[in-house]
Amino acid sequence: MKVRIGLLGLGTVGIGVYQIIQNHQIQLQQQVGCAVEVSKVLVRDVKKKREVEIPEDILTIDVNDIINNPNIDIVVEVLGGIHPTSEYVKQALKNKKHVVTANKDLIAQFGQELLKIAKDNQCDLFYEASVAGGIPIIRSLVDGLASDKITKMLGIVNGTTNYILTKMTNEGTSYHDAVEQAKALGFAEADPSADVEGFDAARKMVILSSLAFSMNIELSDVYTAGITNISKEDIEYAKQLGYTIKLLGLTTRRHGEVDVSVQPTLVPNHHPLATVENEYNAVYIYGKAVGETMFYGPGAGGLPTATSIVSDVVSVIKNMRLGVNGQTITHQHNKRTIKTKDQIFSKYFMRINVKDEVGVFSKIANVFLENELSFETILQKPNLNDRGAEIIIITHQVSLQNFTNSLKAINQLPEVIGVQSSYRVE
């Protein structure tokens, strides 16, 4: 028996998949009990010079040579994007080909539809590599923690932004220079907006939340804020208060209601997530039975992602030999119920620029009192540039609704120059 793979795409990750399969034949055969072969590879240009030698006769510019090829057993999709990729994957599944993908955009938007097609055709659709690079977080949720009830997940699920924030925090690098360094190392795209604006992490949180809570979470359910407005001052004040700023994905469930967000968050320095640096990812999971667990590993780079893809390929082949493909796919059975702003509670950091006048603080305190918001920590610093002052506050737990109302009211005070920044505090 030989399992034949069709590879859609030959970028950094695609090359990694090809190399792992070619260079680990003995280990793979020990795992699955048969030969594994990359039979066809979809590329844009067959004649292009590549980092790795690949026989030209397995290269094709016609996707039908893979998705409509009766000899292909598994399609590995590393093209990225939504269209025409979604059409390719649907056709492959309808042709009873198993699919492994690293495409978080595809799974976040069309995951439920694709899983139904897969189940109807007794096919596997695996997507471990779509979240957190080399960390087996999806397999852990589906298998390892299947018997537990997950109540909360938070984590660093974007290696690009974590690299940028690490450089800004540890070395005082400017945001612009940190982005350019991330590009030079291949951690950031030429246009890094999907990463730095939080959209990439938001798609990953859709996938994780849907799995953890068996609920059809949509991208529009995720409150999303990026790192582009984080300043040197924010980082320094966070340090003084014993925190590190990270772009965190957060999802919680209580009484059947869920909230999901991606936003810059102050993490206490003693928390394990505060020590996760550079391109590394980590996901912290709270389960009723298991308690607290953390999964840590590289979140960016071709080989870590390719490793997750090949692990999914191994799982597909094992299912093929057992004759159980498609039988592990389950649909979301919990009603989608998203918390409103008055049901979401957290501590918050705010940095307020005020005029250096008597009574300013009492005005701010009155706004807090009216919105049932109290202080946990307060710092006041002179602002030499405009002869005003900065007030740095960390609040006690408050609803998102009341905190939002407070920010609006404080900004309207004549004694206040402006709220410079505000972040969630874990």
Image (cartoon, grey):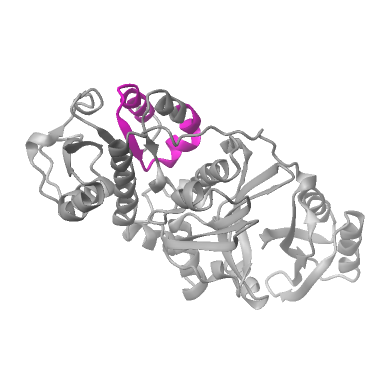
Q: Which residue is at a point 57% across and 49% down the rendered structure image?
A: 147
- Residue 248 visible: no
Task: Locate the C terminus and report the quarter of the image it occupies.
Answer: bottom right
- Residue 322 visible: yes
| Percent x, y of residue 44 | 20, 34
The answer to whether residue 143 is above or below residue 110 is: below
- In the displayed orientation, state which residue is furthest to the front: 322
| Percent x, y of residue 126 | 39, 40
- In front: 128, or 180? 128
- In front: 97, or 216? 97
- In front: 302, or 34? 34
| Number of disc labels | 0
Magenta span contains residue 216: no
Q: Which residue is at a point 82% across and 54% down the rendered structure image?
A: 406
Q: Is 12 displayed left or right of 231 in the figure? A: left
| Percent x, y of residue 404 | 77, 50
The answer to whether residue 5 is above or below residue 196 is: above
Q: Main secondary structure of the magenta part?
A: helix
Magenta span contains residue 106: yes
Task: Locate the N terminus and report the quarter of the image it occupies.
Answer: top left
Q: Is 323 displayed left or right of 266 in the figure? A: left
Q: Is 11 displayed left or right of 422 in the figure? A: left
Q: Is 14 displayed left or right of 146 in the figure? A: left
| Percent x, y of residue 24 | 18, 54
Q: Which residues are magenta?
A: 85-113
Q: Which residue is at a point 23% across and 22% down the rendered structure image?
A: 68
